[in-house]
Amino acid sequence: MSKPIVIKIGGSTFGKGETVIEDLVALQKEGFNLVVFHGGANEITTWLKRMGIETKIVDGLRVTDKESLRVVLAVLAGAVNKEIVAQIQAKGGRAIGLSGVDGCMLEAEVQTKTHGLIGEVVKVNVEPLQIMLKQGYMPVVAPPSYGIGSDKILNVNGDTAAAALAAALGAEKLIMLTDVAGVLDKDGKLLERLDHDKIQALIASGVIAGGMIPKVKACLRALEGTLVAQIIDGRAPHSVIDAVRGKRIGTIIA
């Protein structure tokens, strides 16, 4: 079995007319082993607002208490996950949806009190994914994870969790979809290639900020087990196919 490719779908792009689902199905039919990891931050924020629950973001991560965790679980592991699976199948693909809780696939621990019930993935069990891939299915994974300790379910950042998954799988590549061209410099110009030292310098200077910080840090974590990570614009037509086939789009981190 060929090495899998992990594709992180950002909630900021999904459902806005992109060709992501079409690309995933086409690549699966070509024989690529794909693992899809998805977020859904905008959808969570919408539902929290409807329920009168305040959204608080610190360092690009959502602060999560017990009440908001239930919303996160329902939205990500429920509605968003099953919508993606259904759309893949509607276009002729084969997919199974699950979360990091299932099979203790992602085990997480609370690292700080700042973000509440936000965990950091400390262990990955790839067996459930390997079983599905061998049977010809595309796993579609939601971020909620099994909590080690008193809290048995924890929210985790989708970018960092996708990176941990890619590293543990020894993936061929991690591809992160977002709603910008890639990592941009201070003048808004695309940075086509970055490494660890350049990323640290850009964060220190404030050029990389907000939600892009966990993305680039996640890419660096992925490099512990995979050779390359790539941040691309998921809104661009057939960007997923282009990235999988090695086209130089977005920002490559290696």
Image: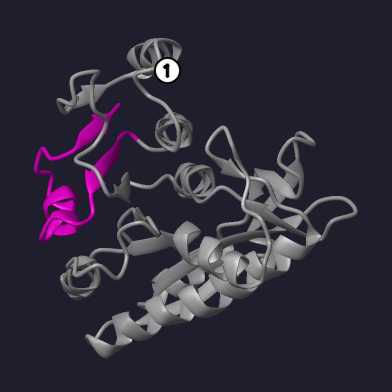
Q: Nearer the viewer, residue 193 or 113?
A: 113
Residue interval drawn in magenta: 227-254
Left/right of residue 171 with respect to residue 158 in the rendered view: left
Q: Position of residue 199 (x, y in %)?
A: 37, 18
Horizontal and vertical percent for residue 226?
Answer: 38, 38
User: Could you say where residue 85 lies in the image, as x and y percent from the top left?
Assistant: 40, 80
Task: Give the secondary structure at mark 1.
Answer: helix
- The residue at 62%/52% (across/down) is 55
| Residue 91 position within the rendered picture, expressed as x and y whole percent measured from the top left | 22, 85
Q: What amino acid type should be assigned to the residue bearing mark 1?
A: Ile
Q: Quadrant of residue 190?
A: top left
Tell whether position 253 is magenta.
yes
- Residue 34 visible in the current orientation: yes
Q: How is the image coloured?
A: one colour
104 versus 208 height, above or below: below
Q: Which residue is mark 1?
A: 203
Density class for disc 1 (Cα within 10 Å; few <14, some 14-19, many ≥20) is some
Q: Give the total of numbered labels.
A: 1
The answer to whether 60 is drawn above or below residue 153 in the figure is above
Asked whether residue 39 is in view, the answer is no
Q: Quadrant of the C terminus?
A: top left
Q: Is residue 108 left or right of residue 97?
A: right
Specify the quadrant that holds the N terminus: bottom left
Q: Residue at x 14, y 58 (%)?
A: 241
* Extreme residue toward the right, this view: 150
On screen, residue 51 above or below 115? below
Magenta includes 226? no
